[in-house]
Image (spheres, grey):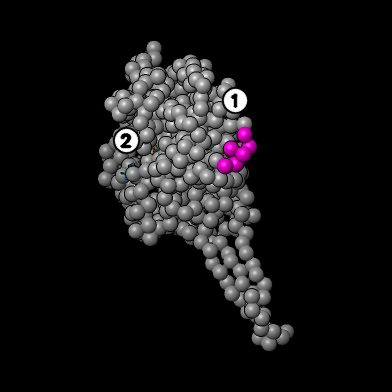
Amino acid sequence: MQVLQNYINGAWVSSQCSSTKAVINPANGEVLAQVPYGEATIQDVANAVAAAQAAYEEWKRVPVLRRIQPLYKLKQLLEENTDEIARLITLECGKTFAESKGELQRAIENVEVACGAPMLMQSEFLENIASGIDEYMIRQPLGVTACIAPFNFPAMISFWFLPYAIATGNSMIVKPSEKVPLTMMKIFELVEQLDLPKGLLNMVHGGKESVDAILEHPDVKSISFVGSTPVAKYIYAKGTAHGKRVQAQGGAKNPVIILPDADVEMTTQIITDSVYGCAGQRCLAASVIITVEDNGNMRDALYAAAQNRKTGFGLDAGVEMGPVITPESKQRIEDLIALSEKEGGSLLLDGRGASISNFEQGNFLRPSIIENLPLQSSLMKTEIFGPVMTLLSMKTIDDAIAFVNGNNYGNMACLFTSSGSSARKFRNEAMAGNIGINIGVAAPVAQFPFSGWKESFFGDLHGQGKHAIEFFTQTKVVVERWPKEWTRKF
Ligand code: NAD
């Protein structure tokens, strides 16, 4: 069985760590590879940081117009290899092939935006702040940066950071999720074809040990993390305690309000795609659906659409929903569905116990819908991260917005309506960082920051767009005087 190598200092090298963890296809339980996992990955991190530090010293002097040239080639290589990368995403992560291709497209869009670094890094200049004195601000890179990624978007999430980090003059270490390292392995095979200094981009495998080594290393200047809220909190606390700049995106439980004036057919389609797409393993998956003054039509339509969703192996034609990532994850979701009943909810649709023929070892669930869950129940505040809709009904938009604002998470909130004034009220009052109006997955395009709030984000500057440019640069302000009488005469 293949033991995955790290990519350090421009070469594929075996880990110093001999213990490994299996990378498993969630659709059939097949072991795809072994990934280094354990204490000794600490040494891998030390080697990667040393290489990244040396590369940074060279790279920061390369003009920004030249630094973006390899990114154009990276975009081309990602496009040429889309099908192969998407297939790998489906094999190790479980989502459908179409979802995998969509994810990769989002990664490529971030490469495109980072190519704008020569414009985006431009700064401020104020002439004559005092007599004969000018003042201006320049943006300079940080040094060695690190990205720690979750399992659910093996390609896209590192690209919220990676292209911006190098376009602005930094080096980077990527630590993919140990559950899905194969996608990033393939992407680094493409990185190898770019004309980059050795050590500029490195990949190290592992889990908590390698992450802790990154957090503690004095030469790592910033951490870009995406994952669950408890780990995001830990990364933020520990990273900042070690003097690093940290952006840490956490979990979610996204509410969606449906007003009585919403179009039933369109709303049903969009919301079921949001709840059950990627088997609910999206930080922007709709989770709690709140109908306002529903006469029953919306409930019936959501039920029918959920029930008809085709579950199966993501590479098979016609499949709309793949498995969840691990057997433990499946068990956790099934336990939470059971908890919903204990806490007073009822099951309109029970997706537990799914078995897909020829994929009996897979971690499959079918769509579930929980109704009547009390607002004070613990499940109402728990991220399920699986194909489960919680359906509530409320009397007014104000009640529904109050519920949205009581949410401990703030990744996304959406409204479905045909009323401009309701939409405007919601946009203004809803306390979440990504807002959808008649949109089910309000994922910002690469030009905009991915704006989680509350327990969904720890830090100041988010991934993507101008926020990423700001995150990966430090500002330097220059106050300058050139007295005429000091100018040498030639
Ligand atoms: P996770 O927190 O378990 O793991 C994320 C990364 O942290 C992995 O690389 C893992 O190796 C590492 N890690 C895990 N435990 C650690 C520990 N104790 N100490 C140090 N490092 C540790 O998350 P996951 O299960 O891979 O991903 C799913 C979660 O990510 C969900 O909660 C989802 O909502 C969230 N997510 C959020 C966003 C967002 O933009 N807010 C996007 C995608 C996923």
Question: Could you tell me which residue is drawn at 35 percent across and 31 percent down?
Answer: 374
In the rendered image, the quadrant that contains the N terminus is: top left
Principal secondary structure, stretch drawn in magenta: helix
* Residue holding disc 2: 378
Residue 135 horizontal side relative to residue 380, left or right: right
- Disc 2 residue type? Ser
What residue occupies the far right of the structure in this picture? 490
Q: Nearer the viewer, residue 137 or 439?
A: 439
Crowd tier of the residue under label 1, counting other residues whose Cα lies within 10 Å: few below 14, some 14–19, many 20 or above: some
Q: Nearer the viewer, residue 155 or 273?
A: 273
Label 2 element class = helix
Residue 271 horizontal side relative to residue 118, left or right: left
Task: Give coordinates of residue 111: x percent, y percent.
Answer: 57, 43
From where the camera sits, is residue 371 visible? yes
From where the camera sits, is residue 95 visible? no
- Disc 1 residue type? Asp
Which of the four quarters of the rendered structure image does ligand 1 lie in?
A: top left
- The answer to whether 303 is drawn above or below residue 451 in the figure is above
Task: Give coordinates of residue 382: x percent, y percent.
Answer: 35, 36
In the rendered image, the quadrant that contains the C terminus is: bottom right
- The answer to whether 216 is drawn above or below residue 104 in the figure is below
Q: Which residues are magenta?
A: 419-425
What residue occupies the far front of the structure in this picture? 395
Task: Give coordinates of residue 211: x percent, y percent.
Answer: 34, 47
Q: Quadrant of residue 242?
A: bottom left
Q: CA distance from mark 2 to mark 1?
A: 32 Å
Crowd tier of the residue under label 2, counting other residues whose Cα lies within 10 Å: few below 14, some 14–19, many 20 or above: few
First in residue order: circle 2 vs circle 1: 1
Question: Could you tell me which residue is drawn at 51 percent across and 21 percent down?
Answer: 295
* Residue holding disc 1: 263
Question: Could you tell me which residue is drawn at 50 percent across and 34 percent down?
Answer: 396
